[in-house]
Image (cartoon, rainbow, N blue to C red):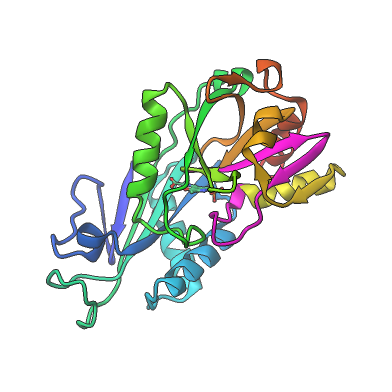
Amino acid sequence: MELAYLNGWLGSLEEAHVSVNDRGYNFGDGVYEVLRAYDGVIFALEEHLKRLESSAAAVEIELPWKPAQLKNITEDTLSKSGIKEALIYIQVTRGTAPRSHSSEADMLPNLLVTVRNIIEIPPSLYSEGVKAITMPEFRWQMCNIKSISLQASVLAKRRADRAGAAEAFFVLPDGTVTEGASSNIFIVKDGVLLTHPADNRILSGVLRHFVLKVAESLEVKVRVEPFKISDLMKAEEVFITGTVAEVVPVVNVDGKIIGGGQPGPLTGLLHQGFTSLHE
Ligand code: PDD
């Protein structure tokens, strides 16, 4: 059964409620993680909890829970749900207080953990690939923080949806492609795998990290450095990574065909390599 844990309370998602004074509700003042469980085992729980801690520290939310407590709460909610193939969401907001931009009032962070059934991803996503669009980067300067303030990403996805695309890639004024609205981007150029460095311009994705590890183990040539929109349009392969859909080939950007319009061989190899990490 799909379950929500909220500040010590456990029950159905429909019954879980936060106050209208929750700062996440009023200000998007919080941080989050999205995780997956494969066959009842949470993938990379430690990596996700580390990133949650560093996001919280970056937005000056002091977590009252030790990493071991967060781990127990998350694993316990999963195990009580009985769901094996799960999508897990962890959200921490600064707390509950009458709405004021100032956050000086005494408050304790609100912790929400939800466990749901993973939505099956159609196999055609991998065998056929997806379309993407590009758009000017209009987010803030701290994209390394997994903040729940996601208005810009939502607008980017709406633009992608309208164009019949699965993802929108952000492009800086100098032509550098940073990442997708909810994914990291990789390209293959002259046989070399390229992805943007994990700085303030991107979220350092957990899947990105593991794909780089798989690439290393396969002795793929990798350069973690910025690349331009002109490189993207001429790439041999393009793919995106994220916890939910893992590794997804991109075969069309802004209406132009990439890599002959077919998912590339390295994309498939890296996805296979990732799959073997949790089988
Ligand atoms: N998003 N970049 C951005 C901006 C993201 O929002 C995400 C994930 C990623 C990939 O991160 P990871 O590999 O750790 O999932 C990169 C999640 C899944 C979401 O917001 O739902």
Q: Residue furthest front?
A: 174
Please tell me which residue lies in front, 59 or 196. 196
Please tell me which residue lies in front, 130 or 226. 226
- For residue 40, say whether it is visible: no
**Point 69% across, 41% down: residue:** 274
The percent position of residue 215, horizontal first and vertical second, equals 78, 44
Does 198 sit above or below residue 175? below
- For residue 13, say whether it is visible: yes
Left or right of 159? Residue 13 is left
Left or right of 107? Residue 226 is right
- Which of the 4 image quadrants contains residue 22? bottom left
The percent position of residue 210, horizontal first and vertical second, equals 68, 49
The percent position of residue 278, horizontal first and vertical second, equals 65, 44
**Point 40% across, 71% down: residue:** 59
The percent position of residue 93, horizontal first and vertical second, equals 31, 65
Q: Quadrant of the N terminus?
A: top left
**Point 39% across, 76% down: residue:** 60
- Which of the 4 image quadrants contains residue 90? bottom left
Please tell me which residue lies in front, 202 or 4. 202
Does 79 sit above or below residue 232? below
Does 67 sit above or below residue 15? below
Numbered-mark total: 0
Q: Quadrant of the C terminus?
A: top right
Is residue 205 in the magenta section? yes
Q: Residue furthest right?
A: 219
Residue span colored magenta: 182-207
Is residue 171 in the magenta section? no
Left or right of 256? Residue 120 is left
**Point 59% across, 43% down: residue:** 175
Does 13 sit above or below residue 95? above
